[in-house]
Image: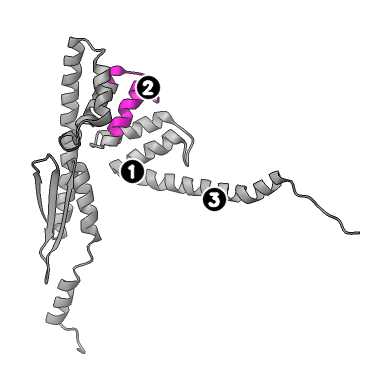
C-alpha cells in the first residue's frame, strides 16, 4: 500500500530557515570577535563598531554598559559618531546614569567636531535644547569642562596622526597638512619614486578622518615596482 506523508508548513520553515539562522549567527559572532580584536588595539572606528554590536546584541548578548564603555574610548579619540552616541546615552540614561550635564558636554563636543565644514548638525540642536534648562552658572561650568575635554581629545588625535605620519615617513612618503579656507582638514602625501611620483590626498571634516583615510590610500599603492625594476637593471643577477 502506498503511504502519503504530509509535512506541515512549520516543519518546512524550520528545515529551510534554521540552517540559515545558525549560519548567520556564526557570521555575527565571527564579525564580533574580529572587531573586538581590532578595538583592543585602539582603533576608534572598531571601538565604535564594537559599541554598536553590544548595543544591538549582534554576535554577543546585548550589554548597554559595555556599549557605553566602547563609545567613550572612541569618543576620547575624536570619533564624532561615538561622541554623539555617548551624549545620547547620557541623555536617555542607557548604559549610564542619566545626566543632562554629561549629555550636553558630549553632544556639544560632537557638534563642534568638524563644525567649521559641516555645521553643528543634529548634535548641536540637541545640545542647545539641553542648555536651555541650565542656569547661567551651570552654562559656565559645562563650558569649562567641555573646553578641557576638547583639549584632551585634540591631544589624543594629534598623538594618533603623528604615529601615522611617522609610519608613512618610514615608507618614503612626505606629508603636508593645512586647514582649508572652508575649514576642511587637508592632507597630502607624496612619495618621490621613478618614473612618476605617487600622490595621495584627502580633505575631511577633522584630522582623525583625514589621516586615517590618507593612510588607507597610501597603503593601496603597490610596492615600488619602478624602483625595484631599476635596481634589477643596475644590478643584474648572475646568468643575465
The residue at the point 33 percent across, 40 percent down is: 47
Please state which of residues 221 and 157 is positioned toward the viewer in this rendering.
221
For the view shown, which residue lies furthest in the right direction? 1
**CB within 8 Å, label 1 to label 3:** no
Helix, strand or loop at mark 2: helix
Residue 84 lies, in percent from the top left, at 29, 31
Q: Residues within 10 Å of mark 2 (few under 14, many from 20)?
A: some
The residue pinned by badge 3 equals: 23
Residue 148 lies, in percent from the top left, at 16, 25
Residue stretch in magenta: 82-102
**Label 1 – label 3 distance at C-alpha:** 23 Å
Relative horizontal placement of residue 60, taking residue 140 as reference (left or right): right
The residue at the point 37 percent across, 22 percent down is: 92
Q: Is residue 83 magenta?
A: yes
**Label 3 – label 2 distance at C-alpha:** 34 Å
The residue pinned by badge 1 equals: 46
Q: On residue 92, which mark appears?
A: 2
Q: Residues within 10 Å of mark 1 (few under 14, many from 20)?
A: many
**CB within 8 Å, label 2 to label 1:** no
**CB within 8 Å, label 3 to label 2:** no
Helix, strand or loop at mark 1: helix
Res. 40 in view: no
**In the image, is residue 64 above or below residue 218?**
above
Tell me which numbered mark, 1 or 3, is placed earlier along the sequence: 3
Quadrant in the rendering for residue 74: top left
Quadrant of image for the C terminus? bottom left
**In the image, is residue 170 above or below residue 233?**
above
Please state which of residues 19 and 66 is positioned toward the viewer in this rendering.
19
Main SS class of the magenta portion in the image:
helix
Q: Residues within 10 Å of mark 3 (few under 14, many from 20)?
A: few
Q: Is residue 75 magenta?
A: no
**In the image, is residue 140 above or below residue 16?**
above
Amino acid at each position: 500500500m502506498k503511504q502519503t506523508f504530509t509535512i506541515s508548513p512549520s516543519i518546512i520553515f524550520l528545515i529551510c530557515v534554521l540552517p540559515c539562522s545558525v549560519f548567520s549567527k556564526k557570521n555575527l559572532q565571527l564579525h564580533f570577535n574580529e572587531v573586538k580584536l581590532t578595538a583592543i588595539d585602539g582603533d576608534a572606528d572598531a571601538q565604535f563598531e564594537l559599541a554598536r554590536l553590544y548595543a544591538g546584541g549582534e554576535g554577543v548578548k546585548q550589554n548597554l554598559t559595555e556599549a557605553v564603555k566602547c563609545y567613550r574610548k572612541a569618543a576620547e579619540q575624536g570619533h564624532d559618531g561615538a561622541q554623539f552616541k555617548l551624549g545620547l546615552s547620557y541623555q536617555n540614561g542607557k548604559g549610564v546614569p542619566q545626566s543632562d550635564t554629561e549629555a550636553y558636554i558630549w553632544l556639544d563636543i560632537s557638534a563642534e567636531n568638524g563644525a567649521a565644514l559641516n555645521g553643528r548638525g543634529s548634535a548641536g540642536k540637541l545640545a542647545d535644547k539641553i542648555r536651555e534648562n541650565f542656569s547661567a552658572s551651570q552654562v559656565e561650568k559645562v563650558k569649562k569642562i567641555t573646553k578641557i575635554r576638547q583639549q584632551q581629545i585634540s591631544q589624543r588625535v594629534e598623538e594618533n596622526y603623528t604615529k601615522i605620519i611617522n609610519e608613512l615617513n618610514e615608507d618614503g612618503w612626505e606629508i603636508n597638512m593645512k586647514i582649508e579656507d572652508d575649514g576642511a582638514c587637508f592632507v597630502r602625501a607624496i612619495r618621490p619614486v621613478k618614473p612618476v611620483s605617487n600622490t595621495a590626498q584627502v580633505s575631511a571634516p577633522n584630522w582623525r578622518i583625514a589621516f586615517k583615510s590618507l593612510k588607507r590610500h597610501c597603503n593601496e599603492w603597490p610596492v615600488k615596482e619602478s624602483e625595484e625594476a631599476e635596481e634589477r637593471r643596475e644590478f643584474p643577477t648572475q646568468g643575465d
